[in-house]
Image (cartoon, helix red, strand yellow):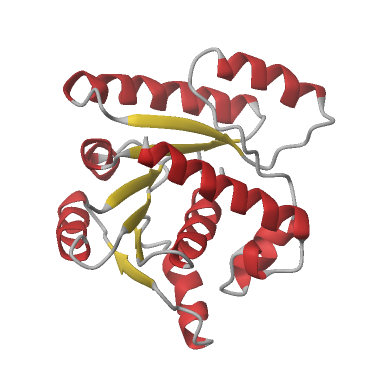
Amino acid sequence: MTKIIGIVQVKGGAGRSTVSTNLAATLSKQSTTALIDCDIPQGTSASWYALRSADNKAGNLMIATASDHKQMVEQIQTLSNRADYIVLDAPPRIAEVTRAMLMLAELIIIPVGATAAELWATSDLLETISEAQKSRPQLAYRLLWNKYRHVTKSAKELSGEVELEAPTLSTRLGFRVAYGDALANGLSVTEYRDRKAKQEVTDLTNEIIKILRG
């Protein structure tokens, strides 16, 4: 059965597309995977895939786009017959497409950085997820610390605060140039030269697979 993973965060610039592309590319090394870019017209994930495809690196990874929740549902229905995993790259807002993701995904990943603005945005999103769980108690979600700096006091303080409110992945993605560089070249960091970033995404993927398998 196809596993659907939504990458959701209402704060712009939180790293949804970075997480989506790295996760989808890494999953595709193991299983057939589809990435649906729901942040249209920006289309960062779709642009990343175009670069990847031009270099003949698509492999077991497919791409689709959806400008609204109806198109997203249609794409999921089509791709479910072809992919073991579907990764949904959400728009930066709580819209109909976001609410639809909460009704369809097995797991929601919420990238969040150690800033007050992202913390506030995440708080609003968690309320929406809580509402969705009333009709879908099986919906799982995890916070993912992104652009994380271990040495900053604010990161440590916010980490403790958010972990009290929501389950958090043990893997954290560091504040690394490699993530932006890999994205700009149609790559995942697992195909790039930064060993620490590669290990982070490998650990993230394995942790997500373990959650999905229950």
Residue 113 placement, left or right of 24 = right
On screen, residue 187 above or below 72: below
Q: Is residue 10 visible?
A: no
Q: Is residue 86 visible?
A: yes
* Quadrant, the C terminus: top left
On screen, residue 196 above or below 7: below
Q: Position of residue 13 (x, y in %)?
A: 56, 46
- Residue at 34 percent across and 56 percent down: it is 85
Q: How many marks?
A: 0
Pick the front one: 16 or 68: 16
Residue 141 placement, left or right of 164 = left
Residue 162 placement: quadrant:
top right
Q: Position of residue 133 (x, y in %)?
A: 25, 22
Residue closest to the far right: 151
- Residue at 54 percent across and 87 percent down: it is 55
Q: Position of residue 98 (x, y in %)?
A: 30, 41
Residue 201 placement, left or right of 42 = right
Residue 171 placement: quadrant:
top right
- Residue at 65 percent across and 62 percent down: it is 189
Residue 212 placement, left or right of 134 = right
Q: Position of residue 164 (x, y in %)?
A: 55, 12
On screen, residue 205 above or below 95: below
